[in-house]
Image (cartoon, rainbow, N blue to C red):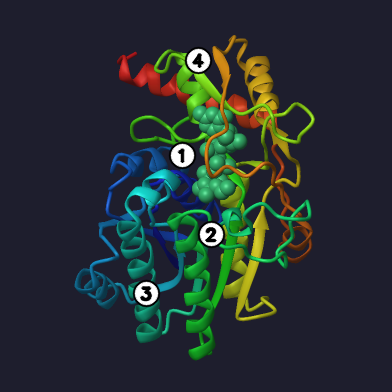
Amino acid sequence: MKILVTGGTGYIGSHTVVELQNQGYEVIIADNLSNSHENVLDHIAEISGKRPEFEKLDFSDPQHTNNFFDKNLDIKGIIHFAAFKAVGESVKNPLMYYHNNLVSLMNILNNMSKHGIENIVFSSSCTVYGQPEKLPVSEDSPIQKAWSPYGNTKQISEDIIYDTLNADQRLKGIALRYFNPIGAHESAKIGELPLGVPNNLVPFITQTAIGIRDQLKVFGDDYNTPDGTAIRDYIHVVDLAKAHVIAVDRMISGKGKKAFEVFNLGTGNGYSVMEVIKSFEKVSGEKLNYKIVDRRPGDVEQVWADTTFANNELGWKAEKGLDEMMASAWKWEKALKEKESGL
Ligand code: UFG
């Protein structure tokens, strides 16, 4: 059975493709390669033994998108990752974010209706909760006004999917609200490849430790948390990827309870920035150069997931702990360095 993975050469997409292939799905990736490399296809093939089909495609281009779906009539479900994802960039270029993230989704949904492709899994984010009043945060917590255009595209996308499914009763969808995905495949053949200076904590840590960056800045130690640094729910990208396969299975086998379902994907544990640093130092044996600076504007103080719904309904639970996540991120960073130096 063939699944289209948009953004399948990206960080979460590539890990999900491997897990889909492991479960016997055939995969076609479509990606515009704006933030990833075509050689990821080779690395996926090295892991799974199977090279996915690939089309270079920008889903915000309606003509190209329509042509793609017209000639790929055997797609049974879609996992839609292809989107811009940098919070700061979205504040500077809101229209670029609204255009890319929303138009792409609408072009895809249009083709689902046109071709009777019934199933879509959408990558959403815990950013839709803002700073929740109650922790851990469950799926029925109120959605807060988005803190960035990026976050707003996730909220609006969920609404667009909900309304489209409502209008075309053949269609089903699952939105997966990710907490903080980190780590890499155990083979160290695929992982996160940030363009330029990373915004996210873990790639910044590993790049600092390997010597690409001088120093990690810890954004704020005056939060109302036990050690004063901000708390997040970090989840291993492979655990996250596996949940996508279960979501696809659920829709295809008709086990879903509603046309549109929403699940939190986290571990249910919150860790502070300092705890992440300590874990990294422990598993890598490296001393990290860091300093405490002011808070980063727009950061929430603390958020972690109530995963009861995903655990019970999907029969899924994140398995990997923080040390394992940090060890895999470090292994990936070291593998990248070896590759670059031609070892
Ligand atoms: N942090 C640092 N130094 C850095 C980078 C991050 O101290 O150099 C801290 C942040 O202040 C935050 C924590 O590490 O407390 C995690 O930061 P990330 O940037 O890794 O992740 P965020 O939680 O800010 O962002 C994630 C996703 C976004 C999403 C957002 C919603 O990456 O896509 O959650 O809160 F929008």
At which x and y percent is residue 338? 38, 17
The kind of residue tagged 1 is: Ile
Determine the CA span between mark 2 and mark 4. Answer: 33 Å
Determine the CA span between mark 4 and mark 1. Answer: 27 Å
Whether label 4 touches label 3, CB < 8 Å: no
**On the image, numbered disc 2 is attached to which residue?**
146
The kind of residue tagged 4 is: Ala
Circle 4: element type: helix
The kind of residue tagged 3 is: Met
**On the image, numbered disc 3 is attached to which residue?**
106
Residue 185 in sight from this viewpoint:
no
At which x and y percent is residue 255? 68, 76
Whether label 3 touches label 1, CB < 8 Å: no
Which residue is rendered at x = 40% and y = 48% of the image? Answer: 50
Q: Residues within 10 Å of mark 3 (few under 14, many from 20)?
A: some
Determine the CA span between mark 1 and mark 2. Answer: 38 Å
Circle 1: element type: helix
Circle 2: element type: loop
**On the image, numbered disc 4 is attached to which residue?**
209
Task: Of the two numbered discs 3 and 2 on the same chain, state the one appearing first in sequence.
Answer: 3
- Image side of residue 102 versus residue 256, left or right: left
Q: In the rendered view of the protein, which quadrant contains the C terminus?
A: top left
Determine the CA span between mark 3 and mark 2. Answer: 20 Å
Which residue is rendered at x = 25% and y = 60% of the image? Answer: 57
Which image quadrant for residue 70? bottom left
Task: Of the two numbered discs 4 and 3 on the same chain, state the one appearing first in sequence.
Answer: 3
Which residue is rendered at x = 62% and y = 29% of the image? Answer: 220
- Image side of residue 57 versus residue 223, left or right: left
Q: Residues within 10 Å of mark 4 (few under 14, many from 20)?
A: many
Whether label 1 touches label 2, CB < 8 Å: no
**On the image, numbered disc 1 is attached to which residue?**
47
